[in-house]
Amino acid sequence: MAKRGPKLKTHCIHGHEYTKENTYAWKKVRHCRICLAARAKALNSTEKRKKRQKICRKQWVKNNPGCYRKWNLKKQYGMSLEDFDKLVVEQLGRCSICDKELFDPYVDHDHTTRKVRGLLCVNCNMGIGHFMDSKKFLLNAISYLEKHNAGKSE
C-alpha cells in the first residue's frame, strides 16, 4: 500500500470552508480570510494608538531632554529641577561615595521611603542597587575584599 501524505483539512478551526476565494496560503500554510479579517478587526485600535503615542513620546523626549528631566525628577523623586541643581552644588558636582566628578548624576533614594539620599555616579548607584541597599551585604563585600586583597593597596 502506497503511503499517503497528510490529509488536507477542508475547514478552518472556526468551521469556515477553505475555498479558493476564502483561502490565503502563506509559507505552505493555509489561512482562512474570514478569520484573518476578524482577528485584524479584533486588534484593539487603542493598542495601535498606544504604539503611535509611544513613538511620539520617544521623539518628544529626544527633542526636549530638559522638559523630560524636569518631569521625571518630579514624578520619580518629588523634587524640582532647582532642588536637583542645589544638590549638585552642595556635593560640589562629585559622587557622594567615590568622590569622582559627576557627568551624568543619578539620584540615589531609599526604595522603601522614597527619600532622596544624594547624587551618585552610575557605578556607585548600580553597586548599591545590586547590593539591594543592604548594609549586611556591603559589609560582607568589604570583608570579602579585605580577605582576598591582603597586601594590595586601594
Image (cartoon, helix red, strand yellow):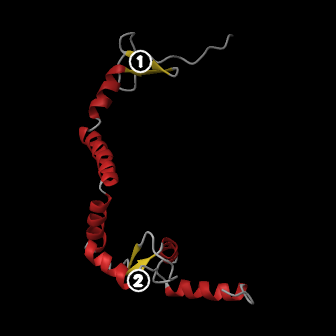
Crowding at label 1, few (<14), some or many (≥20) Cα neighbours within 10 Å? some
Could you give the CA–CA distance between mark 1 and mark 2, rounded to whole angstroms? 67 Å
Q: Secondary structure at mark 2?
A: loop
Q: Nearer the viewer, mark 1 or mark 2?
A: 2
Q: Is residue 30 left or right of residue 117?
A: right
For the point 26% across and 75% down, which residue is it? 82
Residue 51, position as x, y percentages in the image: 31, 43
Residue 97 position, x and y percent, is: 49, 83
Closer to us: 146 or 20: 146
Q: Is residue 9 above or below residue 103?
A: above
Q: Position of residue 130 (x, y in %)?
A: 51, 73
Q: What residue sits right under mark 1 in the picture?
A: 24
SS class of the residue under badge 1? Answer: strand
Taking the spot 25% from the left edge, 41% from the top edge, the residue there is 49
Q: Does the image show residue 10?
A: yes
Mark on residue 92? 2
- Residue 145, image quadrant: bottom right
Q: Amino acid at mark 1?
A: Tyr
Q: Badge 2: few (under 14), some or many (20 or more) residues near its Cα, within 10 Å?
A: few
> Does the image show residue 79?
no
132 in relation to 6, above or below:
below
Residue 3: percent from left, percent from top: 66, 14
